[in-house]
């Protein structure tokens, strides 16, 4: 019995130290001296790696999610013979919920795991230590551009996902199932509010971007420098950031619906 | 891949996101409609607004000419004060028009319909629409209907009893 309580205590302590370490890591990487413009190409490089290279999967899944929401929505709305409201249904569900969450999950799988593996491998091959020996600060040179790149690219990817998914809904609803195009778009415009729906969705995705990138970079930096350690760290990145995204999504949605 | 082409691709990525945001702003959401100064406010007081919501449409003969700006309860006379945010281009509505609250379809949302009067003065900013008709509350109508049916039945029963005696 006492050992069980001991185990619980140890687990609690280790969770606390882990969270504290991750927080210190984030603040140390973000707050540093003004960067020279030469660092900008590092940022461009990570934007390319985590943003541009994620575009194909984001666009393809956006189109398919838009199409499937259109198809499902059409079948439900057809029962009440209000298929003209299809645009509203597709746009609201994509902009408020599916866009930010699905983009975040895909980003965690596509870019988050790659970040962890890259940094973990750098640590395992002692590149980070070598940098420090050369007088280059690995936090500023490696971590900071990767963090910023992730923070920037998740909201941008979410915007693209939403636009593409609504186009996919239009493709299915209007072009294939024959919903009236004018009603589709005008009902959508009447019901979607820029401040309450679009901006709130983007706030969510910005939070998700911070959480995923932070988790990915920290897990890479804290990985046990062996092949097995890196594989564990990569798994942890995807699992933890997916869980955090889903949990935070609920909390943020509840706060936004509560009128915060 | 060289640094130049990499930066070009990142630039395209950002431009694509901006284009997506513009589409979300202007094609998907209501950012363009009824914003800024191209509206004027008209006040109307109703006994009961039913299920009327802010941003519900205001129509004349079914054509949208504005939307509901805000709804507050008047503390003096306990009536609902509704601010109608009218489109500036609809500046030809007579000021003795009457406002009624209707329901779109059997289960649809409520909207305000203005029936034009005959005055030569037009509604302008800050005017008050004096003649209003409250929302028709479906539950009350059904209640009245049931009450009347029961009364008729009871009345019929009484008269039958009276015949017997």
Image (cartoon, rainbow, N blue to C red):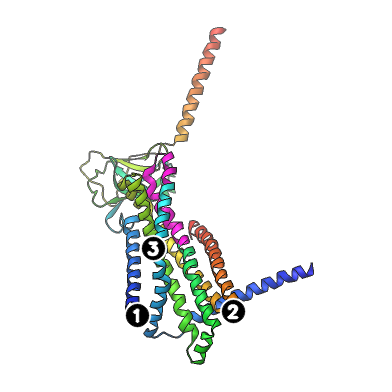
| Mark with earlier residue (3, 2) | 3
Give the chain of mark 2. Answer: A
Would residue A90 be found to the left or right of residue A122 on screen? left
User: Which residue bears the numbered disc 3?
Assistant: A159
Give the chain of mark 3. Answer: A
- At label 1, counting other C-alpha atoms closer than 10 Å, the crowd grade (few under 14, some 14-19, many 20 or more) is few
Looking at the image, can residue A89 be seen? no
Residue B29 in percent (x, y) is at 35, 56
Q: Secondary structure at mark 1?
A: helix
Please provide the residue range marked out in magenta.
A73-102
Residue B63 drawn above or below residue A40 = above
Would residue A56 be found to the left or right of residue A213 on screen? left
Q: Secondary structure at mark 3?
A: helix
Q: Is residue A99 magenta?
A: yes
Give the chain of mark 1. Answer: B
Q: Quadrant of residue A229?
A: bottom right
Residue A226 numbered tag: 2
Do the residues at discs 1 and 2 belong to one chain? no
Would residue A20 be found to the left or right of residue A37 on screen? right
């Amino acid at each position: 019995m006492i050992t069980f309580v001991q185990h619980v205590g140890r687990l609690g302590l280790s969770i606390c130290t882990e969270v504290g370490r991750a927080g210190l890591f984030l603040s140390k990487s973000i707050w540093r001296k003004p960067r020279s413009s030469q660092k900008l190409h590092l940022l461009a490089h990570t934007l390319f790696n985590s943003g541009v290279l994620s575009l194909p999967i984001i666009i393809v899944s956006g189109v398919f999610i838009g199409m499937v929401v259109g198809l499902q929505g059409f079948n439900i709305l057809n029962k009440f013979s209000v298929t003209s409201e299809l645009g509203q249904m597709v746009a609201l569900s994509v902009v408020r919920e599916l866009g930010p969450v699905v983009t975040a999950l895909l980003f965690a799988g596509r870019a988050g795991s790659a970040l962890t593996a890259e940094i973990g491998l750098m640590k395992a091959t002692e590149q980070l230590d070598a940098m420090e020996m050369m007088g280059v600060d690995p936090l500023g040179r490696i971590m900071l551009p990767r963090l910023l790149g992730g923070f920037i690219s998740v909201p941008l990817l979410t915007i693209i996902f939403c636009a593409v998914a609504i186009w996919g809904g239009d493709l299915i609803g209007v072009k294939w199932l024959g919903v009236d195009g004018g009603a589709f778009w005008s009902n959508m415009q009447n019901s979607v509010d820029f401040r309450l729906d679009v901006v709130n969705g983007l706030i969510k995705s910005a939070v998700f971007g911070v959480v995923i990138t932070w988790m990915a970079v920290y897990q890479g930096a804290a990985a046990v420098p062996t092949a097995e350690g890196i594989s564990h760290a990569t798994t942890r990145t995807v699992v933890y950031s997916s869980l955090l995204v889903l949990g935070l999504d609920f909390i943020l949605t509840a706060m936004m619906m509560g009128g915060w | 891949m060289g640094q130049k082409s990499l930066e070009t691709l990142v630039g395209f990525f950002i431009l694509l996101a901006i284009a997506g945001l513009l589409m979300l702003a202007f094609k998907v959401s209501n950012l363009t409609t009824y914003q800024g100064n191209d509206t004027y406010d008209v006040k109307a007081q109703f006994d009961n607004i039913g299920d009327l919501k802010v941003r519900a449409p205001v129509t004349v003969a079914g054509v949208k000419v504005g939307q509901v700006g805000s709804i507050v309860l008047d503390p003096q006379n306990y009536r609902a004060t509704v601010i109608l945010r009218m489109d500036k281009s609809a500046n030809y509505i007579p000021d003795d028009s009457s406002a009624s609250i209707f329901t779109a379809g059997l289960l649809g949302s409520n909207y305000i319909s203005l029936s034009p009067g005959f005055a030569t003065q037009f509604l302008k900013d800050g005017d008050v629409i004096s003649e209003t008709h409250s929302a028709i509350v479906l539950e009350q109508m059904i209640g009245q209907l049931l009450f009347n049916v029961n009364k008729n039945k009871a009345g019929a029963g009484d008269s039958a009893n009276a015949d017997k005696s």
